[in-house]
Amino acid sequence: MKHLNDQELMSIVQAGDFAPASELYDRYSSRIYNFAYRFLRNSEAAEDATQEVFVKMLKHANQFHGGAKLSTWLFSITANHCRDYLRKSENKSKEGEDVLATLPASAELSPERHMERREDEKLIQKALGLLSHDQREAIVLSRYQGLSYAEIAQIAGCSEGAVKTRVFRAMEVLRKALTGDSRGGDRCLTAMP
Amino acid sequence: MFDCDAMRENMPLLLTESLDPVQREQTHQHIETCPICVAEWSAYKETWLILDKLPEVAVPPRVKQRFLAEISPAMAQAMAQTNVVPFRRGRTMRWLAQAAAVVIVGSSAFYAGHRIAPRTQLIPTQAQVTAIQPATPYYSIAESRVLPAASISPQIEGRPDIQNVQFSDASPLNQQIGVSFDITSHVTVTGRPTDKSMVRLLRYVLENEDRESPSRSRAIDWVRATYANVGNPDPEITEALANVLRNDQHQGVRIKAADTLQSMQSAMTDGTRDALVEALKNDPNPAVRLKAVEALAKLARSGVALDPDMVDTLRRKASQNDENVYVRVKAAEALSSIQPR
């Protein structure tokens, strides 16, 4: 299966054979899980989301068309699932406690450096928690998944301009939270040639 | 004239290098000439770098297990109700394939029976062929067998290439655990955790499975959970874990092996204790050394007399200035608990 590309694997699934399921999972589960984990900030919910996304991938395989990248389609399913989850549960997350509970101990760092890193992670998770769902989705897909604004727009079901604004607003909030820099909003009107 | 707000909106795009060349040039020129935007740009870059400190998280192996378990005939049924037309083998082809599988399995058993010693022979009459049935028409792998552990020899000859290893926990009805894997057909061996054949099989799985860290790590997790409730685990299990601790190239796996050994004190052998001492002495990773010294400290606390080499290693670690502080503390703790031999 490893030598087949995504489209070929999906064609097999579309023909009713789930044999490529494991290979597809291996290719994309890490990206899907990490996206869901950062979006939802809850490891259990991210696990459920990952499982659900791959089940939906098989169940609705006929809705996947070769024109789009499989990763974009899977991120769309994940984003929909996460938005539903957040809407339903109004998930008042535990502000990073979950992160501490689930991140594996690093094997290479000294205990002090390890604690430092945990603190950094906690701080970033807290900062991500300050964002609106739309902003968090956009910044996570942009910063951590490296997607273009066009791809994010497709996943989020909005315009590229809206994505640009969401990422910008998210960066404003994160900058204040992470660097303590609360300037922003100052104006200058420097003339450009 | 460019508004700073418009320039700032472009900053995240600059960070991802997604701006078109003209806008990129304009934004950079603006930043260079606007003292406020210079500071803004610097703060954006800093924020972007800080965000990088959030590491990738590994997907827990149980997610894949749950996902694969859900791909069942019921799932296929649901799919069949959609507009997708599933690929199904024709009846004739299916029976031909099944007949061929039976011939292959039969021939292999015959061949194996004549090739290796009688004690390794599978007893075909006790094998339950459970999945060669028309009831599961959507499975890609049509041939599966379930073998009781008693029907296989505890001696595993050669190095069969086993793949796709799955575990099933003890059934509340009969306390049977299961290990499934593919060789030429999918085989599930069931038995009690204490059955010698099952122990041998698990040892083989631990030492050989896939040689990939995620699956070995999964095997260790499962062994640990399974044998947590077994009073006296077979020492072969701890010896297998000791071999993993000695040889696995992935530090995460070695950490797990040492940690699991710590939870199986009653089954420790001289070999497993030596593996822990070797890890404490030589493992390049401090977290592995820490787990090893914790296991030895627990051993010392339990009243087991440690041999001179272990005591010497603990003493050197406790006073080694460039050793990790936690390792040193644990080594000292172990020394203070040692019973004289």
Image: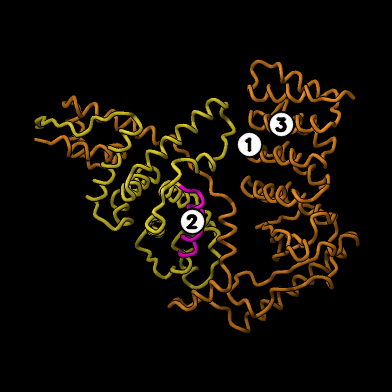
Chain colours: A yellow, B orange
Nearer the observer: mark 3 or 2; the answer is 3
Q: Which residues are magenta?
A: A42-56
Q: Please report the residue visible at 37 percent of the width from the left and 66 percent of the height from the top.
A: A65
> What kind of element bears circle 2?
helix
Q: Please report the residue visible at 40 percent of the width from the left and 59 percent of the height from the top.
A: A88
Say whether mark 2 and mark 3 are on the same chain: no
Q: Residues under labels 1 and 3: Cα distance? A: 16 Å
Residue B294: image x %, image y %? 71, 31
Amino acid type of the residue that numbered disc 2 sits on in the rendered structure: Thr
Q: Main secondary structure of the magenta part?
A: helix
Say whether mark 1 and mark 2 are on the same chain: no
Which residue lies under the disc numbered 1? Answer: B251
Residue B239: image x %, image y %? 80, 42
Q: Residues under labels 3 and 2: Cα distance? A: 35 Å
Q: Is residue A127 left or right of residue B120?
A: left
Q: Is residue B196 left or right of residue B168?
A: right
Q: Chain of mark 3?
A: B
Amino acid type of the residue that numbered disc 1 sits on in the rendered structure: Gln
Which residue lies under the disc numbered 3? Answer: B294
Nearest the viewer among B204 and A126 is A126
| Residue B298 lies in the magenta stretch | no
Which residue lies under the disc numbered 2? Answer: A50
Nearer the observer: mark 2 or 1; the answer is 2
Q: Chain of mark 2?
A: A
Q: Are marks 3 and 2 in contact (CB under 8 Å)?
A: no
Residue B54: image x %, image y %? 44, 38
Mark 2 residue crowding within 10 angstroms, few (<14) / some (14–19) / many (20+): many
Q: Are marks 1 and 3 in contact (CB under 8 Å)?
A: no
